[in-house]
Image (cartoon, grey):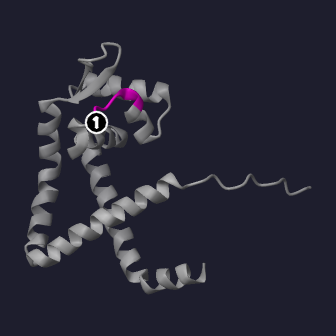
Amino acid sequence: MIETMKSQQAHAELFAAMREFTLESDRYVDKVASLHGLHRTDLNALGFLIRPDREANAMTPGKLGEALNLSSPATTALVDRLERSGHVNRQRDKNDRRQIQLAMTEHARGVGRALFTPLAAQLTGTLAKYTPEELALVEKFLLDATAATAEALENLQAPPANKPVNE
């Protein structure tokens, strides 16, 4: 425990920088969503649908709801909203016709490009300041940090219920 605290203190500036990046990224996404009449959850859902491993792991409404921590009714409302807005299609699985898969539309990809091209342009300018070796290290760090965050998420447990004060 003490070792972990020392390690966290040694990396306090890096943790602060990561927190600031996360906050600014969230603010960007919130603003983009607002400007285009989308819910934040809609953009998060589309983010899961466009992931590089998407082809190997078909996204179903159930998997999407689980990824976004949504109830079944909330997931249905989300998918209905995305379908009405032309962002996703529901498709029957080729092997199991009972299974529904979600497919992102070209319209959604175009909207995504429009929403995030300004950010990509800014980041491209920033990336140009670094050597290929530095960028490889940053990429490795981000992949490792993402994996560590996913592992921490998997290991989260609810805190013990608070006892009433009058006991």
Residue annotated with mark 1: 57
Q: Residue 152 location in percent, x, y?
A: 48, 59
Q: Residue furthest top?
A: 97
Residue at image x 28%, y 63%? 143
Residue at image x 28%, y 51%? 29
Image quadrant assignment for residue 12: bottom left
Inspect this view and state whether residue 111 appears: yes
Q: Is 88 drawn above or below residue 49 in the view shown?
A: above
Q: Nearer the viewer, residue 27 or 17?
A: 17
Kind of element beneath mark 1: loop
Q: Which residues are magenta?
A: 58-62
Q: Is 51 drawn above or below residue 65 in the view shown?
A: below
Q: Nearer the viewer, residue 31 or 91?
A: 91
Q: Is 123 drawn above or below residue 88 in the view shown?
A: below
How many C-alpha atoms fall within 10 Å of the one at disc 1: few (<14), some, or many (≥20)? Answer: few
Q: Residue furthest right?
A: 167
User: Position of 122 compared to 56: left or right?
Assistant: left
Q: Residue 90 location in percent, x, y?
A: 27, 20
Q: Amino acid at mark 1?
A: Asn
Main structural element of the magenta stretch: helix, strand or loop?
loop
- Image quarter in which the N terminus is found: bottom right
Residue at image x 40%, y 76%? 16
Image quadrant assignment for residue 131: bottom left
Q: Nearer the viewer, residue 31 or 108?
A: 108
Residue 59 colored in magenta in the image: yes
Q: Residue 159 location in percent, x, y?
A: 67, 56
Q: Residue 85 location in percent, x, y?
A: 24, 26
Inspect this view and state whether residue 51 appears: no
